[in-house]
Image: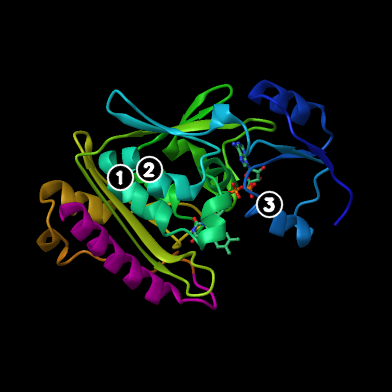
Amino acid sequence: MQDVQFHRPGSVRDAIAALRAAPAGRFLAGGQSLIPMLKLELAVPSDLVSVAHLAELKGVRSERGALVIGAATPHAEVAASDVVRRALPALAALAGGIGDAQVRNRGTLGGSIAHADPAADYPAALVALAATVVTDRRELAADQFFRGLYETALEPAELVREVRFPLPERAGWAKFPQPASKFALAGAFVAKAASGVRVALTGVGSAPLRARAFEDALAKDFRLAALEKVSLPSAGITDNRDASAAYRAHLAGVMVRRALAAALA
Ligand SMILES: Cc1cc2nc3c(=O)[nH]c(=O)nc-3n(C[C@H](O)[C@H](O)[C@H](O)COP(=O)(O)OP(=O)(O)OC[C@H]3O[C@@H](n4cnc5c(N)ncnc54)[C@H](O)[C@@H]3O)c2cc1C
């Protein structure tokens, strides 16, 4: 690892100023993705600007039909939050199934979505719930936020402040984890709202994928029976040593059915 300047700013404003002044800086939240990248020299930043301790970026609150979660809120806090469990239990379940205890205690919502791992859990929830990512300078719909493999719409030195999740009528989450990493081989988030049904998959492509055939079927009839003849084609689905495209596509269909069952429970 090369030498890195470490900053511990006292506010969001100072964090952004520190990153803007750095030649090749990165925000550091829980470090659960960035520190391994540093060790492997997949990222070689000049400066690390810590945001994990900033109270402005932490916490959960209810707000006019939505749940708002601060970017630096650790997964464990989301999983244990009474507010989340009551308002959006599927999201609490998702956060409680991320990685292991250390990852959940250190890793954050903002870090997860900014990193945009193709098998991460939160991105599917953001897309299925039509969430809004609030940054230091604008608001981005989840559909616009995730651009591809480890790629988002964030600009240099743009900080995720919080995510606003509109509350659905019903929602459910299911994932089949890779046994060693706990990342999804396939995961599905199903949400039914007044505006319609959205089904988002993770682990099957370079970014969260809307499963339109499942959405269309569930929009007509939000019951398991509606999915009897619906499947995900394996063309274009991730195919690697962990799972073939055909296996992953089948698994994704199973995860949609399990997520729907959870939503209906
Ligand atoms: C063993 C292991 C198992 C895991 N299993 C899972 C799993 O099952 N499911 C899952 O979804 N994830 C899993 N993860 C990833 C985990 O969720 C990480 O916590 C997450 O990907 C990154 O969050 P972080 O807070 O640690 O971010 P960091 O590692 O600190 O940062 C990641 C990236 O986000 C940027 N960043 C951080 N905060 C912000 C912000 N507020 N605004 C803008 N950019 C920001 C950083 O600059 C960096 O580029 C696992 C990780 C490990 C190590």
Question: If the image is split into quadrants, where does the C terminus sit?
Answer: bottom left
Is the residue indicated by label 3 positioned so its CB lies within 8 Å of ligand 1? yes
Amino acid beneath label 3: Leu
Q: Can residue 87 be seen by looking at this rendering? A: yes
Establish if 213 lies above or below 60: below
Q: Position of residue 128 (x, y in %)?
A: 33, 45
The secondary structure that most of the magenta stretch takes on is helix
Residue on which the image places disc 2 = 81
Residue on which the image places disc 3 = 34
Q: Nearer the viewer, mark 2 or mark 3?
A: 2
Per the model, the C-alpha gap separating discs 2 and 3 is: 26 Å
The reply to whether dot 1 and dot 2 touch (C-beta < 8 Å) is yes
Residue on which the image places disc 1 = 85
The local secondary structure at tag 2 comes to loop
Amino acid beneath label 2: Ser
Q: Is residue 176 left or right of residue 207?
A: left
Residues rendered magenta in the picture: 239-265
Q: Position of residue 34 (x, y in %)?
A: 68, 52
Residue at x-position 23% and y-position 63%: 257
Per the model, the C-alpha gap separating discs 1 and 3 is: 29 Å
